[in-house]
Amino acid sequence: MNRVKDHLLFGAEKLTQCLSSERVPVPQDPGTLAPCFAEMDVVLHARMYKAGGGGLAGTQKYARNYVKSPIVYPQSMLDRIIPPAFAADDPEKLQQLREGLLSTCVVSKLPGR
């Protein structure tokens, strides 16, 4: 398994354990939640690119250089997440973006949703 899949699955497994301990119905396969952590990667990389002096257009253009797999990181995900991640300069707004993305993604993948 490559490193990208490892950290996404690790996060998904830990979140599944936390949700299970709270008696939240969770997917049978923890990997179901891995795309939610991929979204967090996109936020992180967009912010890193911006911190390095890159602009939004460059971030969008070179996104494939930092997130290689089009299966794990589909273009639609990049197009949806990069602009708001790039724009969230206030730490509180960035935290709200992260929390909103993660909670929306996780809830959409829970059984019965």
Image (cartoon, grey):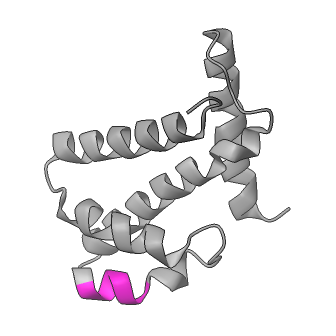
> In the image as oriented, which residue stretches furthest toward the right?
1
Q: Residue at x 38, y 90 (%)?
A: 61
Q: In this image, 26 relative to 107: left or right?
A: right
Picture coordinates of residue 26, whole percent (x, y): 68, 26
- Looking at the rendered image, the quarter that the C terminus falls into is top right
Please give the name of the residue rendered at 26% of the width and 87% of the height, measured from the top-left corner: 57
Quadrant assignment for the N terminus: bottom right
The image quadrant that residue 29 belongs to is top right
When the figure is inspected, residue 66 is found, relative to residue 109, above or below; the finding is: below
The image quadrant that residue 86 belongs to is: bottom left
Q: How many marks?
A: 0
Question: Can residue 91 be seen at all in this image of the molecule?
Answer: yes
Which residue does the image show at 70% across and 45% down from the upper left?
A: 32
68 vs 75, left or right, is right
- Which one is nearer the viewer's eye here, 27 or 14? 27
Q: Please name the predominant secondary structure of the magenta segment in the image.
A: helix
Q: Is residue 53 above or below residue 42?
A: below
Highlighted magenta segment, given as a residue range: 57-62
Q: Is residue 29 magenta?
A: no
Residue 9 or residue 113, whichever sits in front: 113
Location of residue 52 in the rendering, given as x and y in whole percent from the top left corner: 29, 75
Q: Does the image show residue 54?
A: no
